[in-house]
Structure formats: C-alpha cells, structure tokens
Amino acid sequence: MTVNVEVFYSFQSPYSYLAMDPIYDIADKYNVELLWQPFSAKASGQPVPQTGVLPDKLSYLFEDTKRLAEERGLSLVYPEGWPEVEHDPGRLTRGALIANDLGVLLEYNIKVFNKWWGLGENPNEDAFMNELCDDLDIDLGDFLSKVSSSDTRERVKGIYKRGRKLGVFDTPTFVFDTGERIVGYDKIPYLAQRLEKMGLRKK
C-alpha cells in the first residue's frame, strides 16, 4: 500500500529549507509517493499584499530557525534586508518543474536551498544558475529555455491555484488525497507518526 502526499514548499521559506532532509527521510522510510509542488504567489504572478510582519513574530522566526539550524549542524544565512527585501523566486520555482521533468528534482531542491539559504547566494545572479546547471550536469541553455516558456509559467500558476483551493497558506504543507492538511516544519514528526500508524513503514 502506498499513499500520495502533496508537498507544497517554497524556496522563499527558511522553514522549507530546514524541512528538506526530514521530508526526504520520510520518503526513504515509508511507502509514500511525494508530489512536490513549488508554491509561490510571487512566482505565479499573483499580487502579494504588502503587509508588515509583527516585530515580535519576526524576531521569533529568526530565533527559531537559527536554533533549529544549529541543532542540525546546518548553515543558515538570511538575505540582507529580508523579508522586506526578498529575492525573486520566479526562475527557480519554474526550474523545479523542469528539474522534475528531467528526473533531478531531489538534487535540484537540495542544491537550490543550500545555495540560497545555506550559503546566502543571490538566486537571481547568473552565476547561481550557471553553477547549479553545471552541478546537475544539465544543459544551461536548454534548461533556461524551458524555464522561461509560457507552458512552464502556466504550470506554476496552476500549482498556486491548486494550493489555494486546498487551503495552503504556509510552507511546508502536506496534503493527503483526502484533503487533510498537515502544516509546518514542526509537524513533520507527526506526519511520520501518521504514516507509521497506517502501517506504511517499508520492510
């Protein structure tokens, strides 16, 4: 028996960055088919409300993510001025769909998150994409052509619309076939417990 779980994640989110290894660990341990859904209002061309983040909430986000990263021995570098100043996620979000088509999404996700959040590199600089494609051994020109196509842009919009229809409001969010949502990095252990109780641990 295998269950399908949609994983809505965002390259803009430090919690999605921290979630990568635990999510892939779940895929290794349980009979679960993960459908990765790169989710971003900005990348899909949707208007993003300019609502400020509460100072106390923002300071806790920094405190919490840095603590979690330190506990796991991960580097975490926030972009200067974040979240008021944020890198454009469009090209890399679309790139995730092409990477999936090419069968290298796992490596793509890990490398993109590490470069963006682990090393603090700017994803909109040419060197970022050049090095990424070189590391993945894929043709840069062909990759960029597919990333910029109208078809890929529409696919990103479709994923965002689907996420909103399912009630996705934060990342990472896990959605079962039934529509049940499990939201947040801190709920990943609960997701594993649910799969365990369903008898889905691999033999």
Image (cartoon, grey):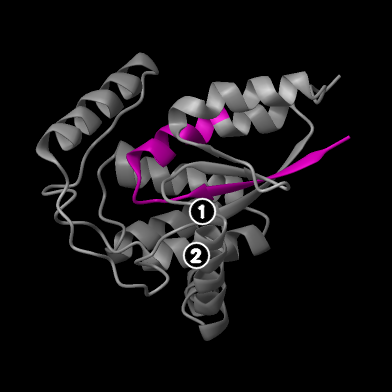
Q: Is residue 163 above or below residue 170?
A: below
Verify CB contact (< 8 Å) between mark 2 and mark 1: no
Label annotation for residue 134: none
171 magenta-colored = no
Residue 19 on the magenta segment: yes
Q: Which mark is residue 160?
A: 2
Q: Is residue 158 above or below residue 28?
A: below
Q: Position of residue 122 (x, y in %)?
A: 25, 55
Q: Secondary structure at mark 2?
A: helix
Could you tell me the amino acid type at mark 2? Answer: Tyr
Q: Residues within 10 Å of mark 1 (few under 14, many from 20)?
A: some
- Going 57% across and 81% down the picture, which residue do you hit? 151
Q: Position of residue 78 (x, y in %)?
A: 21, 40
**Secondary structure under the numbered disc 1 in the rendered image:** loop
From the viewer's perspective, tell me whether residue 125 is left or right of residue 169: left
The total of numbered circles placed on residues is 2
| Structural distance between the alpha carbons of marks 2 and 1 | 11 Å
Q: Residues within 10 Å of mark 2 (few under 14, many from 20)?
A: many
Residue at the spot 17% in from the left edge and 48% down from the top edge = 82
Magenta-drawn segment:
1-22
Q: What residue sits right under mark 1 in the picture? A: 167
